[in-house]
Amino acid sequence: MYGKGCILSYALLCAGACLCYRGALECGFVFDDVSAIRENRDLRPSSPWTNLLFNDFWGTPMNKEQSHKSYRPVCVFTYRLNYLLHGLQPFGYHLANVILHALVCLLYKRTCSLFVSEGTAFLAALLFAIHPLHTEAVTGVVGRAEILSSFFYLLTFLCYTSAASKRSATDWFYFSFSLVLVALATFSKEQGITVVGLCCMYDVFILQKVRLPDLLKSWKGHLKETGRRLTVLLSWTLILLAVRLKVMSIQLPVFTKFDNPAAAAETPTRQLTFNYLIALNSWLLLCPADLCCDWTMGSVPLILSWSDPRNIGTLAVYATLCAILWNILWVDDVRSRILLMGLSMCVFPFLPASNLFFPVGFVIAERVLYAPSMGFCLLVAHGFSLLAT
C-alpha cells in the first residue's frame, strides 16, 4: 500500500506540473529565446561541437569583451539536440522544458522526504510544481538553464546523502558520482555550484547533528570522515571555479545602467537598493501577484535615502533570517533541522544573483528564483503540517 501511495503521489506531481504548463507547448520564441536559439550559430550542425566549450550561452566567444560570460555548455548541448531533432520548431524546445520541470518535481519530493513526512514532502513538491513564479523559467526556453541546473543540483545532493548515509564511512562510488553531477549542474548554470554549500550543511548539521556550542570540541571520531568528504568536495569546487575563471579569462561581464541601475549608483543608494531587492524577491516567493517578464531600468525605483519606507521591508527580512538562524544553530531538534535545510535551499542558490558579491545583469529575474523556491516550498509545507496537527 505504501508503494502504491508513493507511485500515485509521483503520478499526481507529474500531472500537476504538466497540466500547469501545457499552454507553453503552443508558444514560440520570445525575448531572450530569439538570441539563444534562433540566432545562436552554435546550435547548427555546421558548427563544431567544440564551440560549446569556448562560447557563451549566446554563441559569443568567452574571450570577447562583448560576451556576457554566461558559460552553460551543458544547457546549450540540449538545445543543439533539440535542433538536430526538429530544427527551429518551438514545440520540442518547450516540451523538453515541461518534461524537465516534471522530473525536477519528482526529485524534489524525494529530497524533501529525507527531512519531513511523505505527506509534507508531497505538499511541498506540489506547491513547487504549480508555483506561479516558475512561469518564466518553464515557459521561456532560456529558462531551461535554471531547470537543468536544478535537476543536476538535486541529483548531486541525493547522491551525496547516499554517499554519507553511514556517517562514519563514505560510499566513494556515490561520492564520485556526486562530483560529476555538481560539475554538470555548474555548467548548466552558474548557481549549480552552490549545491556544495547544501551538502556541507547537511553533512555537518543534519547527519552529524553538530551545533555551534559543540562544533569545535566535537570534531573527532566519525567527524574525521566528514572532514575527508568535505575536503575532497571543497577541493573539487575550487577546481570547478578555477576552470570557470579560466574560461572567462578572469574578466567579469560588462553591464550597462539599463541592465542594473543600482550597480551604477553611489553609496548608500547602491547598498540600500541591492538589499531591498532581496526583500522584494522574498515577497515574490510569498505573493507572486505582480509578475513581470522584464524587470529592467526603472521597474524598481532606487532607494535614495535611509528614510525610504521600503527599508522596513529589508529590515523585516533580515530580522526573520536572524531569528531562524538563532533557532537553527543553537537548538538540536527535528524542527531546527527542517528549518536549516529549508533556509539553506533558499539562500545558497540565490547568492549568485543577490548582487552581494558581484553585480548581475538584471534588476529582478524571476527565473533565478526557480531553485531558491525549493527551500521556500519546504518551509511552507512544514508550517502547514504543524498547523494541521
Image (tube, grey):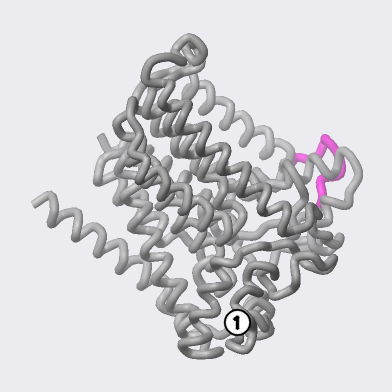
Q: Secondary structure at mark 1?
A: helix
How many labels, in total?
1
Q: Position of residue 84 (x, y in %)?
A: 50, 86
Residue at the spot of label 1:
43
Range of magenta residues:
302-309
Q: Main secondary structure of the magenta part?
A: loop
Picture quadrant of residue 22: bottom left
47 left or right of 311 in image: left
Extreme residue in the left direction = 1
Residue at the image point whose x is 81% and y is 45% from the top: 303
Residue 74 drawn above or below residue 32: above
Q: Position of residue 201 (x, y in %)?
A: 48, 32
Residue 289 appears anywhere in the view = yes
Q: Residue at x 31, y 46 (%)?
A: 121
Q: Is 58 drawn above or below residue 345 in the view shown?
A: below
User: In the image, what residue occupies the spot 32% across and 41% down?
Assistant: 162
Q: Which residue is found at the position 62% from the left and 89% from the top?
A: 46
Residue 35 in percent (x, y) is at: 69, 79
